[in-house]
């Protein structure tokens, strides 16, 4: 259904001109693939590719209470993190359900932070952050509409960012570090982050600057990559997608992301619920499952025991392009979540045997 | 532009049928394979399975999605194209050569409810 008020990123015309298959995602008309998902996936694994991720949200928080406030709404602990460092974590409801997963950037200006959130959750997150801010001396500014963002990902990403774009950082960036630069006199954030399991950069700047950066990359032969391979790449790397592997009902403990939740902090929203989940265990857990067939376990397919009892459901699944195996994430009863537990997946009318495997299916190649 | 071949029957769910006596040779159209992108898996029925007209008989999987296939005519599966099951990309390469199943029709009159090439072209041009 064509919606009247579907949003477009600043690069929308370029996607259409490149012949991309477009589809609505998180309220935006986004490119799913330009040519072939497998080719785009392999470009990122073996060479370099560029994604339009301008739909992501940028919410700035500053003020005397900013650090204390963010530590109140964020599961990870930003204390002691220096300017230029980035932290991954979640915002939770008091019951441990997830509002969103996000990146927190500590800015070089004291008491300034940037929160990068999922496109599908921008409005919800902004409301949540504002509601939680009562009693804190902070200013909250949702600038999502005026920032564009491209992600340059793959083993040649550093070469492309430095040579094709001529972007230079004062000091070499490690993974989850960023620097400020400029593009045509406007702020450019150069962030060594991504959502593919490869080394890469996310470049945030004005909408005009984003178009110029995109055009330079495409002219230099960097392969445009759509959301189709963004999903296959993040999935192989064991990275969750909000809505599938994290949600209001799937907590970080259930998803196996407890390492991003610092229960030793004095407090944060949802901490008590998570502490109880950690102490008592959760009824369900997110696992990886590999099946011995080329059939593809898709989201929503039942996970069963040999006798046909359903014990879980698939959240994301593919025939992995990098590994040539059919694998999935599934939320299953905790007693069947141990590695090597035999489980069966019902795919249409047939049932395929498989077993529990580690969720990080693919060995990631991040720059240390 | 996707390819459409004269002399075949077509279904609204994008299967084609080539009639050889009382046997219906069934595949998916060029339009369908192009919409799906790279096909990586063919979920085919077994020989001897019986399907009613319009019943799901299998599925194709691309990286991103699965797409069910519906039997255009009622009958019994007498042969499955193992070459295509073993090499699903053949559906992308030649949708009209890469038949999926052969069905012994129980009611050949059902063919009259399917589209000819001109009608199918009109459907896919929409």
Image (tube, coloured by chain):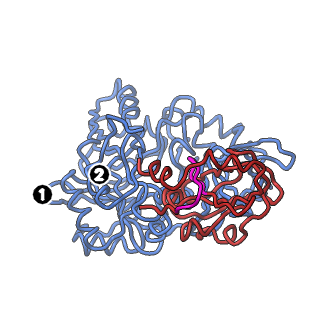
Chain colours: A blue, B red
Q: Is residue A344 visible?
A: no
Q: Which of A124/A211 is in front? A: A211
A82 is higher (above) or lower (below) than A361: above
Q: Which residue is mark 1?
A: A185
Q: Which of B56/A312 is in front? A: B56
Residue A5: name its quadrant. top left
Q: How many residues crowd around disc 1 within 10 Å: few (fewer than 14), some, or many (20 or more)? A: few
- For the record, the magenta segment spans B6-16
Give x and y (percent) for residue A100.
Answer: 46, 40
Mark 1 against mark 2, which lies toward the viewer?
2
Q: Magenta stretch containing residue A249, yes or no?
A: no
Mark sitting earlier along the chain (1/2):
2
Q: Which residue is mark 2?
A: A12
Point out the image quarter for the C terminus of chain A: bottom left
Residue A176: name its quadrant. bottom left
Q: Which of A218/B36 is in front? A: B36
Which residue appears at 53% of the width and 44% of the height? Answer: A261
Disc 1 to disc 2, C-alpha distance: 24 Å
């Amino acid at each position: 259904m064509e919606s009247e008020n579907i949003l477009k990123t600043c690069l929308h015309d370029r996607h259409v001109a490149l012949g991309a298959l477009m589809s609505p995602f998180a309220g935006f008309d986004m490119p799913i693939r330009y040519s072939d998902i497998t080719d785009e996936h392999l470009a990122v694994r073996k060479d370099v590719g560029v994604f339009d991720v301008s739909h992501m949200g940028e919410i700035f928080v500053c003020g005397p209470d900013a650090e204390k406030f963010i530590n109140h709404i964020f599961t990870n602990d930003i204390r002691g993190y220096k300017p230029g460092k980035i932290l991954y974590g979640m915002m939770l409801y008091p019951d441990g359900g997830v509002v969103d997963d996000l990146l927190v950037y500590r800015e070089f200006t004291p008491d300034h932070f940037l929160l990068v959130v999922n496109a599908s959750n921008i409005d919800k997150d902004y409301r949540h952050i504002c509601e939680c801010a009562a009693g804190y001396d902070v200013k909250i500014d949702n600038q999502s509409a005026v920032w564009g963002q491209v992600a340059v990902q793959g083993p040649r990403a550093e070469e492309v960012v430095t040579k094709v774009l001529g972007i230079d950082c004062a000091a070499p960036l490690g993974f989850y570090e960023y620097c400020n630069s400029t593009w045509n006199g406007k702020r450019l954030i150069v962030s060594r982050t991504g959502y593919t399991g490869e080394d890469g950069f996310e470049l945030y700047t004005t909408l005009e600057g984003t178009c110029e950066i995109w055009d330079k990359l495409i002219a230099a032969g960097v392969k445009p990559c759509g959301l189709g391979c963004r999903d296959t790449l993040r999935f192989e790397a064991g990275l969750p997608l909000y809505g599938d592997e994290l949600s209001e009902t799937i907590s970080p403990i259930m998803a196996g992301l407890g390492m991003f939740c610092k229960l030793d902090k004095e407090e944060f929203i949802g901490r008590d619920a998570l502490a109880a989940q950690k102490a008592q265990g959760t009824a369900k857990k997110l696992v990886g499952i590999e099946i011995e067939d080329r059939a593809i376990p898709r989201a929503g397919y039942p996970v069963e025991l040999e006798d046909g009892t359903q014990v879980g459901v698939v959240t994301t699944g593919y025939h992995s392009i990098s590994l040539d195996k059919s694998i999935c994430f599934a939320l299953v009863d905790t007693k069947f979540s141990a590695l090597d537990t035999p489980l069966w997946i019902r795919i249409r009318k047939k049932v395929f045997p498989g077993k529990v495997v580690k969720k990080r299916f693919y060995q990631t190649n991040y720059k240390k | 532009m996707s390819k459409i071949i004269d002399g075949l029957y077509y279904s609204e769910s994008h299967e084609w049928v080539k009639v050889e006596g009382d046997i219906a040779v069934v595949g998916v159209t060029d339009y369908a394979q192009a919409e799906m992108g790279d096909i990586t898996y063919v979920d085919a029925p077994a020989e001897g399975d019986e399907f009613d007209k319009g019943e799901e008989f299998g599925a194709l999987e691309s990286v991103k999605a699965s797409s069910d296939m519906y039997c255009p005519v009622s009958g019994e599966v007498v042969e499955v194209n193992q070459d295509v099951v073993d090499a699903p990309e053949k559906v992308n390469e030649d949708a009209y050569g890469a038949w999926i199943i052969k069905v012994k029709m129980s009611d050949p009159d059902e063919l009259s409810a399917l589209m000819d090439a001109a009608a199918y072209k009109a459907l896919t041009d929409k």
